[in-house]
Image (tube, helix red, strand yellow):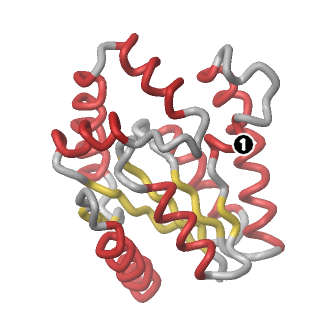
């Protein structure tokens, strides 16, 4: 059975890094990074949030089609609202696939530090996201997301939690692999 593997968590905790590695080490897996897809929308730099809202339905369609016809999908995406998360879960289930939900957790202050230092120039949206967070209230916005994500995990008992520590990507990746295996063995 094909699987949609959601890597959820605060910005900067390693979702995309781990997803890229997973796809590289699991040939045939689609890496569906909504932030990358958003850059395909004309004017995405001018209205980053609107571009994201526009691309999500396309991402859902692509995910469902890939799950139905081709193989696994790994999705690194911050989803703090149950209603948004359930759209991706429904797409997987409707495609006859398994939905594996993994929350990459980090100590909140560590996550905030990592968010601010994550721009190595490879992802052109990082400065835009940093600006949006600053405009919305800065680090308090990130701390609020941390609380919301903990509440989300409490409401979704099948979510697997993996600790993500700065400069320990290999350990987090190993733990993600174990969480995927554990989820697959219980379903």
Vertical relation: 153 (above or below) 182: above
Q: Quick one: 147 or 34, which is closer to the camera?
A: 34
The image quarter containing residue 37 is top right
In terms of secondary structure, where does tag 1 sit?
helix
The quarter of the displayed image where residue 124 is located: top right
Quadrant housing the N terminus: bottom right
Q: Which residue has dot 1 on it? A: 37
Q: Nearer the viewer, residue 154 or 136?
A: 136
* Residue 9 seen: yes
Residue drawn where x is 53% and y is 24% of the image: 128
The residue depicted at 66 percent of the width and 77 percent of the height is 2
Residue at the bottom extreme of this rendering: 185
- The relative height of residue 127 versus residue 176 in the rendered view (above or below) is above
| Image x and y of residue 54, in percent | 73, 28
Q: How crowded is mark 1: few (under 14 residues within 10 Å), some or many (20 or more)?
A: some
Query: Image quadrant for the C terminus?
Result: bottom left
Q: Where is residue 82 in the image (x, y as percent from the top left)?
A: 43, 41
Q: Where is residue 174 in the image (x, y as percent from the top left)?
A: 36, 79
**Residue 82 visible at all:** no
Q: Which residue is drawn at 46% across and 83% down?
A: 184
Q: Where is residue 51 in the image (x, y as percent from the top left)?
A: 69, 26
């Amino acid at each position: 059975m094909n699987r949609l593997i959601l890597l959820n968590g605060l910005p900067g905790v390693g979702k995309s890094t781990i997803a890229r590695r997973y796809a590289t080490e699991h040939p045939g897996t689609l890496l569906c990074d909504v932030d990358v897809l958003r850059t395909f929308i004309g004017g995405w730099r001018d209205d980053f949030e609107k571009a994201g809202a526009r691309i999500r339905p396309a991402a859902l369609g692509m995910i469902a089609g890939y799950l139905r016809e081709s193989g696994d999908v790994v999705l690194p995406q911050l989803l703090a609202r149950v209603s948004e998360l359930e759209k991706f879960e429904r797409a997987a289930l409707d495609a006859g696939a398994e939905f594996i939900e993994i929350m990459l957790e980090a100590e909140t202050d560590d996550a905030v530090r990592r968010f601010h230092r994550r721009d190595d120039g490879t992802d052109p949206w990082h400065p835009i996201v940093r600006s949006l967070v600053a405009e919305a209230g800065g680090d308090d916005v990130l701390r609020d997301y941390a609380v919301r994500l903990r509440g989300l995990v409490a409401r979704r008992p099948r979510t697997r939690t993996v600790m993500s520590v700065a400069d320990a990507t290999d350990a987090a990746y190993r733990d993600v692999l174990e969480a995927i295996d554990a989820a697959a063995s219980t379903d």
